[in-house]
Amino acid sequence: MSFKIIGLLLVASASLIEAVGQLSFKRGATQSGGSGALAGLATLRHSPGWIGLGILCFILEWGLFTVALQLLDLSVAYPAGSLTLVAVVLLSRLWLGELVGLRRWAGVMLIVTGTLLLGG
């Protein structure tokens, strides 16, 4: 397997892990019931598990993406990282039950197309 393929797999893994982190933060924020300037503190107090998972995901994502940068040009790795946006939309639909309209699906297809053009 070539270094480029390994790098792209690392970026894809990092993107998926970051998306899980984002959804964990969302889940923690909605369970806290807080709003306003001190909402972050309320979130930590009421949902430490979800927030902790989100932080762990960001640490893992950082490590994987850093290794990927050793194998790929930044001009390939960074656009490929936009797949995080696609993963967030898909997981928001599947895990959180959010409604995703046609316009968002069209945006997802544009992101995938652009990523393929830049990274392929």
Image (cartoon, rainbow, N blue to C red):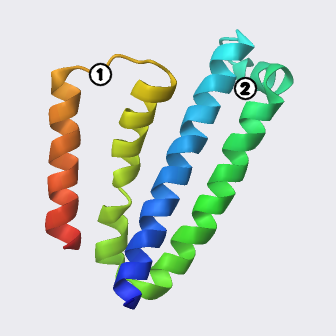
For residue 91, the mark is none
Q: Is residue 88 above or below residue 77?
A: above
Give me the residue at 36% from left, 77% from top: 74
Q: Is residue 119 above or below residue 6?
A: above
In the image, 47 versus 38, the foreground residue is 47
In the image, 19 versus 75, the foreground residue is 19
Q: Position of residue 1 (x, y in %)?
A: 39, 89
Give me the residue at 71% from left, 11% from top: 34
Question: Is 98 on the left-hand or right-hand side of 50?
Answer: left
- The secondary element bearing badge 2 is classed as helix
Give me the residue at 49% from left, 86% from top: 70
Question: Is 53 on the left-hand or right-hand side of 101?
Answer: right
Give me the residue at 48% from left, 77% from top: 68
Q: What is the distance, in whole Å, between disc 1 and disc 2 at their CAs?
A: 27 Å
Question: Is 119 on the left-hand or right-hand side of 78?
Answer: left
Look at label 1 and name its amino acid. Val
The residue carrying mark 2 is 40
Q: Earlier in the sequence, mark 1 or mark 2?
A: 2
Q: Residues within 10 Å of mark 2 (few under 14, many from 20)?
A: some
Q: Quadrant of residue 117?
A: bottom left
Question: Is 115 on the left-hand or right-hand side of 9?
Answer: left
The residue carrying mark 1 is 100
